[in-house]
Amino acid sequence: MSRLRFSTAREVFETFPSAHEAVTMPPTVESPLAFLARLAKGPAPTEAIGFCAFLLPRREAVWWGLQAVRAMQPPGMQDPGLAAAEAWVREPGDRTRFEALKLAQAGDRARPGTWVAWAAGYSGGSMVESHGVPCPPDLTAKMVRIAVLNAINRLPSREREGALRRCIEACIRLAEDDTAKR
């Protein structure tokens, strides 16, 4: 069963107008996954990462982003941002979300995991723990996009194309698989 909440690529852009900042290809009425495949094969395949981030629901986008970033890091590397984001994915709620947000605020913005923590922290509810400041609905996608592209760009150039392809494939699997393990 599909996790897709959109019937067409155009619906993604209608829901998130800021997706036009990440994806320059004009939206169509084709299925989101067909549009994603065309993006990945097009002249700017990194735009597919942005589309993935907007296509997935917030929790799945954070999960996808943290898994993508983790796969590109050296084995055994500990990243507190990824750990905080994973804690929120496994137990979504204000406590874990604000923990991820605090870690992101204090984290190293050069690290992709910090951006994944921002994505979890901005996944809904208030942006400020002490009073209600609603999170804009597109912030999770924007932060996940930054995280994944940051991780890809840290790789040696010869590895980037393969990493990009694996990230897109992981998004497609997550979007299509309603029984995805966490």
Image (tube, grey):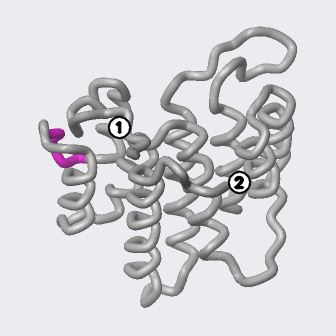
Contact between labelled residues 1 and 2, with CB atoms less than 8 Å apart: no
Q: Main secondary structure of the magenta part?
A: loop
Q: Report helix, strand or loop for mark 2.
A: loop
Q: Quadrant of the rendered structure where residue 169 is?
A: bottom left
Name the residue rendered at 21%, 36% in the picture: 8
Task: Give the quarter of the figure containing the C terminus.
Answer: bottom right
**Number of residue marks:** 2
Give the residue pinned by disc 1: 19
Q: Locate residue 2, reporting x and y percent.
A: 38, 45
The 10 Å Cα crowd at callout 2, few under 14, some 14 to 19, many 20 or more, is: few
In this rendered view, identify the residue nearer to me: 102 or 56.
Answer: 56
- Residue type for callout 1: Ala
Q: Locate residue 125, reporting x and y percent.
A: 69, 19
Q: Is residue 29 magenta?
A: no
86 in relation to 163, above or below: above
Give the residue pinned by disc 2: 109
Name the residue rendered at 66%, 51% in the picture: 116
Name the residue rendered at 55%, 49% in the picture: 144
Q: Locate residue 175, reporting x and y percent.
A: 42, 50
User: Which range of residues does the magenta coloring cover?
Assistant: 24-28
Q: Quadrant of the rendered structure where residue 68 is?
A: bottom right
Mark 2 or 1, nearer chain start: 1
Taking the view exactly as shown, the residue that stands out farthest to the top is 132
In this rendered view, identify the residue nearer to me: 8 or 180.
Answer: 180
Q: Locate residue 118, reporting x and y percent.
A: 69, 42
155 in relation to 140, above or below: below
CA gap, disc 2 and disc 1: 22 Å
